[in-house]
Amino acid sequence: MLENNLTDNAVMKLGDDYFLHKLDDSLSWLFNIDSGECYNLNESSFFVLSLFDGKKTMEDIRKIYVTKYSLTETENKMLLRDVNELLKQLINDNVLAKIKKEDDNCI
């Protein structure tokens, strides 16, 4: 699990200060428009980040990622571990932001 307050049903998007750009299959970046920082991305990192459209759940994104890159059950486990670590880092760095739902404010 990523964080105690984030479930598989959590819906997230790129933070407001971030955007993705892809020039071609070998050149893609994540830009922070507030700080001016630019991060070169490999194909799989760009793919994962592009899935955060504010509609898909964390579980949806994990399934799409594993389906795209995995060939065996052993690879599934390794890919899930890797993508969970990547997602933790992106959340901790505020690259990803949780979408607030109306029922999130209910007591």
Image: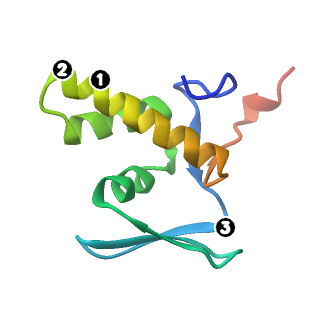
| In the rendered image, the vertical position of residue 104 relative to residue 11, given as above or below | above
Q: Quadrant of residue 21?
A: bottom left
Report x, y in % for residue 42. 33, 61
Report x, y in % for residue 78. 30, 28
Dot 1: within a 10 Å radius of its alpha carbon, few (fewer than 14), some, or many (20 or more) residues? few
Residue at position x 44%, y 29% in the image: 59
| In the rendered image, the vertical position of residue 42 relative to residue 35, given as above or below | above
Tell which tag, 3 or 2, sits nearer the viewer. Answer: 2
For the question of whether residue 23 can be seen, the reply is yes
Identity, as a three-letter code, of the amino acid under mark 3: Asp
Report x, y in % for residue 34. 71, 74
For the question of whether residue 57 can be seen, the reply is no
Residue position for label 2: 73
Mark 3 secondary-structure assignment: loop
Residue position for label 3: 17
Q: Quadrant of residue 98?
A: top right
